[in-house]
Amino acid sequence: MFGLIYKELLANKKQLLPILIVTAFSSFFMIVPPIVSDMEEWEVNLTLSFSSIIIALVVEMFQQGIFEHDERKVWQAFICSTSDGIKKQISSKYIFNLFISSMMFCWCTFLSYIAAAISDHNVAIAGLVLQLIVFIQIFFRAFETPFIIRFGSKKGNVIRMVIMGTIVLIVLIYALFGDLSIFGSIEDLIKWFQDNFTETVPMIIRLTPACVLFLYWVSYKISCLLYLKGGESYDK
């Protein structure tokens, strides 16, 4: 298992360079503005949240490509010939993706603490946004990985984009022509968020990890079942 995870680091080391560059650039904007300007609390939270989103998007693109170098029939045959090879192969991918997301979370959290100390502001909102970003990222990995395992990176990503695009289109159509009165006005939503920020919102955040990680585990089990079938789309 450790050997397969180490292989992921070696196989993807070239792709890690762009992540480090964008992370360093975004980290600059998480720390420097509070030093050189007298930012208000909402501005600090907005800057931290926006920078975290940029870093997460770059990590997202990296995570989507970690399957490509193993999509070969020769490698699949070798893995299947080893003891629990399929489980180790799939779990190494899932653990590696989880490791990357965890490192992103730890780094952005560290920078948020520094920004809070510099600006002397409360950055709890930015912290909650960061947690949601990480959970959403893990959820997307849980959703898309079985498609990638079954149909290969290219076809799997196309199928994922079609499904996600369909969902987004349905939501947009409902937003344009559906009855939105059940949700109240934007002012009502903002007021609800402010009134429940210290109680309801943190509770939602605390419940989210268990749900997302459970879906991640279910996704892993499904991917293990689909691995052999997915070899039909691999190159020799």
Image (spheres, rainbow, N blue to C red):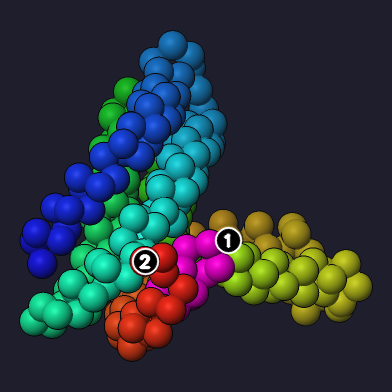
Query: Is the residue marked by circle 2 packed among few (<14), some (14-19), or many (20+) residues within 10 Å?
Result: few
Taking the spot 31% from the left edge, 36% from the top edge, the residue there is: 14
Check disc 1 and report the residue beneath it: 193
Taking the spot 29% from the left edge, 51% from the top edge, the residue there is: 100
Residue type at mark 2?
Lys
Pick out the residue farthest to the bottom.
225
- Mark 1 or mark 2: whose residue is earlier in sequence: 1
Query: Is the residue marked by circle 1 packed among few (<14), some (14-19), or many (20+) residues within 10 Å?
Result: some
Boundaries of the magenta span: 147-156
- In the rendered structure, find residue 236 and report the number of the disc placed on it: 2
Magenta stretch encompasses residue 102: no
Q: Whole-percent x and y of residue 146?
A: 43, 77
Decide if residue 191 is in sight here. Answer: yes
Q: Whole-percent x and y of residue 62?
A: 41, 48
Of 156 and 32, the residue lying toward us? 156
- Image side of residue 23 versus residue 184, left or right: left
Decide if residue 139 is in sight here. Answer: no
